[in-house]
Amino acid sequence: MAEPIISFNKVNKWYGDNFHVLRDIDLQVAAGERIVVCGPSGSGKSTLIRCINRLEDHQEGRIVVAGIELSDDVKAVEQVRRQVGMVFQQFNLFPHLTVLENLTLAPMWVGRTPRKLAEESAMQQLERVQIAEQAHKYPLQLSGGQQQRVAIARALCLTPKIMLFDEPTSALDPEMIKEVLDVMIELANQGITMICVTHEMGFAKAVADRVIFMDQGQIVEQNTPHEFFDHPQSERTKDFLSKILGG
Amino acid sequence: MAGSIFQPIPARPSPVKTEGLLPWLRANLFGNWVNSMVTVLIAVALGYAASGFLTWGLVNAVFAPNADQCQAARGSGACWGVIAEKFRVIIFGRYPYEEHWRPEIGTILLLGLLILSCIRRFWKPWLVPAWIGVLFAFFTLMAGGKLGLSEVPSDQWGGLPLTIMLATLSIVFAYPLAILVALGRQSALPAIRSLCVIYVELIRGVPLISVLFMASFMFPLFLPVGKSPDVLLRVLVGITLFSAAYLAEVVRGGLQAIPNGQVESAQSLGLTYWQTQRKIVLPQALAMVVPGIVNSFIAIFKDTSLVTIVSLYELTGALGLALNSEADWRPFKIEGYLFITLIYFVFCFAMSRYSLWIEHQVSRSKTR
């Protein structure tokens, strides 16, 4: 394997003094790899991906992203964040800005792109997620599915190398999940490195190179989707799969 | 019923009308016989009070600046003559009489720019030099001492110009200071956080009067004789620090209402702390607390009347000065106070209407 784009080396994290949320995480992600992380709630899967762009800090071990080690060094963290896009469960669009302004904000202020250029590439991203006609509306005027597609387009505006998805479809009405998943599948097929926390097992089967199962702050098992779903190794995984697949 | 076929029902207007004057009257004033009785009773009481006031304030009132007539009408009619007689002292305080045109022009300039600054169309970069220019012109006109203007020491400034200048400048300086303090109270750095907490709690724990006393009488004791800054400047700093503490708490209320997800998504896009605050957090937080902010602004405007106690005669102080200077006019306090009440009301009402407009502007993004 070539130099991994993300590497976790014996990472431990606590919330407060006693809540040991990540335990001895070792994880290497190759460039272009598509990973789905699943597990019961409280297993640390969101915390894991939030450590990648340092929305959470870790107390032990090393995390290296795109060749930069994450530490208290603010400049290093900002450099990592420019290469890592993130999509949240609650969309987190900026409600006081129009859709277009949501997209151009980071390119103009972080990337120092002139407004005209930023708007042109923002419109391209909006077309990519098929929502260009809503560019001048405010986020709260859109449906949940549309908002999440805008959030994806916004994260793509700085042309990141890595995309993180934190349960992107969990807050959506059933009718809207598909439109978001379609965008994500399209993105996955274009070769971007993707780490996705989700319980959409259909999505995992369709696009993932690897599925990671976490429980109680540890990586219990990781495998190709085929092996993972058809021949789970540990009892914990079998139990989890039987619950979410209803089998 | 099982098997019945779905039939869409077209929309139709409500059978009960609620829009228009008559339905409004019926719904709000004459809903049932109790409401109708109360409405009539209140209308009669209001009419009685209004007719009494009109008899006193208009029919029996004396408008000429004539002390004898006023004396004769005492008890039955108002003496508006006192305002005609003392108008210029009330408005300009102790400022030298022949030089009143200077504060007049200065205040008109200041108010004009203030009004321009409230209109969206004029929110352009030239406003900054315009403000510097107007403030420079205002202080040159007021203080004099150059361009052939006679010098007027700042303890003789007074009346409405002083009120407007103190209020404007303390609002302009207190607002950014309040934002910084509010952000400081949320800072991750303990030193900054506790400094801001101490500042707010300390200032909120004392009345404005004692802040003004300290600024005006105690502060000079710590400085070498004759080296102390101008009393007006010290008072201005006092009001600014005082109002900023209150304003900071209003702003902090807005900051706390911003969901953490907003900050996280800004961070995930690579925005720095200050970019996040400026572009994401503050626009939303400040929009949320517009009523509270304007509330504080109105309070600042009226609090300026307390500078009288350190012998600066702003509008309220100037009224006292005007009434007490001549025994003939001393009894007509009510008329004088009604007059400056009207002036205060015009300014405060304008601010509260403007605040409604701002609220309307910032609520656009929330409408579905």
Image (spheres, coloured by chain):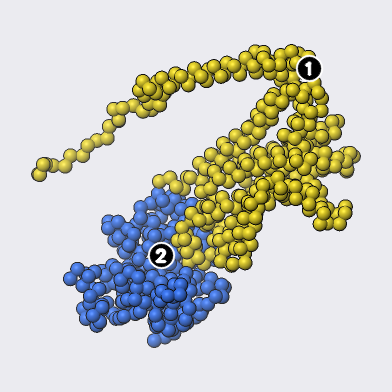
Q: Chain of mark 2?
A: A
Question: Same chain, marks 1 and 2?
Answer: no
Tell me what residue is drawn at x 50 percent, y 41 percent: B360
Q: Position of residue B85 (x, y in %)?
A: 78, 22
In the image, is residue A108 above or below residue B23? Answer: below
Tell me what residue is drawn at x 44 percent, y 47 percent: B366
From the image, which quarter does the N terminus of chain A lie in?
bottom left
Q: Position of residue A70 (x, y in %)?
A: 50, 77
**Badge 1: residue crowd in 10 Å (few <14, some 14–19, many ≥20):** some
**Badge 2: residue crowd in 10 Å (few <14, some 14–19, many ≥20):** many
Q: Position of residue B82 (x, y in %)?
A: 75, 22
Check the image and name the residue furthest to the bottom. Answer: A1
- Can I make out residue B26 in this image? no
Tell me what residue is drawn at x 71 percent, y 48 percent: B210
Q: Chain of mark 1?
A: B
**Residue highlighted by disc 2:** A87
